[in-house]
Structures are given as C-alpha cells and as structure tokens.
C-alpha cells in the first residue's frame, strides 16, 4: 500500500452532514433557503443542448460579462469551482511545505483544510470572548515569514464583520503575504474591499454563488486580484475545473439584480425577527453581518439541534468550536417564524 504524505496522515477527515436535507427547512449550511432565480432555470432550459454538453467549457464571454458586473478587468478575475477551489488555488500558488499561514479561529474549515494539506505551518488567532474581530492580535501574529492570511468577512460561524478601512493595516503589515478576504456573505453585509485590489498587490478577494444566488449545487465562485497574480493563479488551476452549466447559470444570476435585492431584504428582515425572538427567550445571540446567527444554547446545544431536526428544521451545532453554540441560517420571514415556533416549543 502506498504511503500518503505526512500532511495527509496528520489531517482530520472533513465530513459535512449533507445527506437527507432536501425535504427539511435548511437552516444549517447558510444556503439560499428558497432556491435560485427563475432566470437561472429558464436560461439553462433554453441554452443547454446535447451539443453544448459535448464541448469543453469556454469562458471568454462569461468572463467579460462577470468582470463588468464586478467592476474589474477581465484579467483580474479567475473562475473557480466554488470558493473552496479559490482557497485551494491560492494555497497551491503561494504556499510551500512549512510556510507560515495565519488563520482566525473559529473560521471557515476549508482554510485550515487546504493549509494543512499543503503542509503549512499554521498560526491561529482566536476571536475575542465576545466574538469581536481580534484585529490587534492578528496584526501581532503577522511576521516577515508569513506567506498567507485567510480571512472571512463576515466570518463564519461567528457572523463577525470588519470594516474595509480596518483591513488596510493587515495588508500593510504583510506586504509579502497573500491576503485573502473571503466575501462569501458580502451581499448581506455590504462591506467589500474588491475595489482596493488596484492599490494592494497582496490582496485577493473571493466571492461565491452558493449563498445569495442560490447555486450551491453548481459550485461556482470567483477569485480576484491584480492581473499579475491572476496569471500565476491560472497556472496552478486545472484548465476546465468550472463546468459549462455553472458558467451559464452565473451569467443569468447576475443579470437578475431584482432577485438578489429582494432576497437580501427578506433575509435581513428575517434576521431581525430571529434576533428579537431569541432575546425574548433570554437566549444570547451574537451580532451578525451575515445570513446566519450564532446563539448560545449551553449544554442543550446538541439536544436542541437533534430535536429541531426531528421536527424538520435543520440547524448547525458549533459547540465543538464555541462551547454551547448553535448556528441558524436566516432565510425568509416565514421561515424565521417557523424556526422560533419550534424552538419555543422545546426551550
């Protein structure tokens, strides 16, 4: 039997609980809870043919359209197979075995996953007890040897956000490191540093179509940086990793701006309903700038999750990272009321 690399042997397996969710109220993975725009479905119905599926993907037209939508040049955008591949390509491009990568804790699991897979030396900075962004501790953790810093803004699972101006000192402290700002939940926070790639050669920004656009099954994302960086990223990426169906769907999704606006408005209203409902139950909820809320269920975290699941409402236990914490995705106002009704009945 061949021996795997040491980095692989040391890793914990990542097995997200993704089976059997289709018929439940999906408030566990921060997906769009109502589905993608009808414009996406109609586009696929009218465009997909047997011939189209027999050809390797072509990206030129889509790249022009999405670059214009995001306000970047065509050579400043890389299509990726979800944000996960964006993280992987960045790590593969800039990190050698033993290189130092700085992460926040807790944060999105794939940052650590791909850093570990590369054999990186990982330095983790803990969030404050109130889950506010630990800017000063993060700055203190950056050293001349730091090669990459991976930050979700807003952060998952805490919902914590940082303003764009506060990201500047991070970029300045780490001029030789690849600094990724993962903006998976940008549409809900409204905070972005994407325009700043023009001024910072060490800045990388990622966006996903798995959240507000309702296309998690498509696996489509974008990674942005200065053109010279994107050229190197292309060299580290499989040439056809993004499939034709995802590209067609992404083009249709960005054209339907009304859908995105309406869903965001609905989600923000639902977020307020859940926050108020949790407060009425004397349950501590942490401030969130994303489409989810982290709340404290104490020793009841796992029983609450399991009983809600039995009632057809899926939430995510995060007590393995934050003792007693449960995360609930925010969808529509009706879904927020359903969640609170079920929670009240078991609390």
Image (spheres, rainbow, N blue to C red):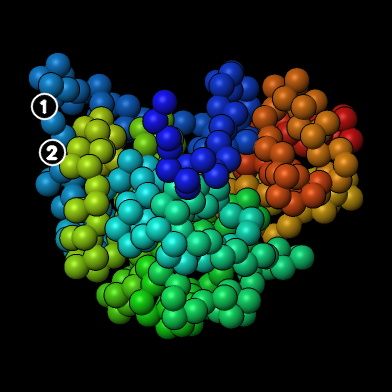
Q: Quadrant of residue 344?
A: top right
329 left or right of 237 in image: right
Question: Which residue shows up at 50% across the image and 62% down it?
Answer: 121
Q: Where, quadrant-wise, is the C terminus in this rendering?
A: top right
Label 2: element kind: loop
Relative to the observer, which residue lies in front, 214 or 322? 322
Relative to the observer, which residue lies in front, 103 or 281? 103
Relative to the observer, which residue lies in front, 26 or 168? 168
57 left or right of 87 in image: left
Q: Are marks 2 and 1 in contact (CB under 8 Å)?
A: yes
Mark 2, Cα crowd under 10 Å, few <14 / some 14-19 / many 20+, is few
Relative to the observer, which residue lies in front, 280 or 6? 6
Mark 1, Cα crowd under 10 Å, few <14 / some 14-19 / many 20+, is few
254 left or right of 319 in image: left
Distance (Cα) linking label 2 and label 1 = 8 Å
Label 1: element kind: loop
Which residue lies under the disc numbered 1? Answer: 55
Relative to 171, residue 3 above or below: above
Question: Which residue shows up at 54% across the image and 43% down it?
Answer: 11
Q: Tag on residue 199?
A: none
Q: What x and y, as percent, mark residue 97?
A: 40, 58
Question: Which residue shows up at 15% across the image and 19% down it?
Answer: 49
Relative to 284, residue 270 above or below: above
Q: What x and y, as percent, mark residue 290?
A: 58, 53
Q: Tag on residue 58?
A: 2
Q: What x and y, as percent, mark residue 84?
A: 41, 45
Question: Which residue shows up at 86% across the image and 45% down it?
Answer: 298
Q: What x and y, as percent, mark residue 185?
A: 50, 53
């Amino acid at each position: 039997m061949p021996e795997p690399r040491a980095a692989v042997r040391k890793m914990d397996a990542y097995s997200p609980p993704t089976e059997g969710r289709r018929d439940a109220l999906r408030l566990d993975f921060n997906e769009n809870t109502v589905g993608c725009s009808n414009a996406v479905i109609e586009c696929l119905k009218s465009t997909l043919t047997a011939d189209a599926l027999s050809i390797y993907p072509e990206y030129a037209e889509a790249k022009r359209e999405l670059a214009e939508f995001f306000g970047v040049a065509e050579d400043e955008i890389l299509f990726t197979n979800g944000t996960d591949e964006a993280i992987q390509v960045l790590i593969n491009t800039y990190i050698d075995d033993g290189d130092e990568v700085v992460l926040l804790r807790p944060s999105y699991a794939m940052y650590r996953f791909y850093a570990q897979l590369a054999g990186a030396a990982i330095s983790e900075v803990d969030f404050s007890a109130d889950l506010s962004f630990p800017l000063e501790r993060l700055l203190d953790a950056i050293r001349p040897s730091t090669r990459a810093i991976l930050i979700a803004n807003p952060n998952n699972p805490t919902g914590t956000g940082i303003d764009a101006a506060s990201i500047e000192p991070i970029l300045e402290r780490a001029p030789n490191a690849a600094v990724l700002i993962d903006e998976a939940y940008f549409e809900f926070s409204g905070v972005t540093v994407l325009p700043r790639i023009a001024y910072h050669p060490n800045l990388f920004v990622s966006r996903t179509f798995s959240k507000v656009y309702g296309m998690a099954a498509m696996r489509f994302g974008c990674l942005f940086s200065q053109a010279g960086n994107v050229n190197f990223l292309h060299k580290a990426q499989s040439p056809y990793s993004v499939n034709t169906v995802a590209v067609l769907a992404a083009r249709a999704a960005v054209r339907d701006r009304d859908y995105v606006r309406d869903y965001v408005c609905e989600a923000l209203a639902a977020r307020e309903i859940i926050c108020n409902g949790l407060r009425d139950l004397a349950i501590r909820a942490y401030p969130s700038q994303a489409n989810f809320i982290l709340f404290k269920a104490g020793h009841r975290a796992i029983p609450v999750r399991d009983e809600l699941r039995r009632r057809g409402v899926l939430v995510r236990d995060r007590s393995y990272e934050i003792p007693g914490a449960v995360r609930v995705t925010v969808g529509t106002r009706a879904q927020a009321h359903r969640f609170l009704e079920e929670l009240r009945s078991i609390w």
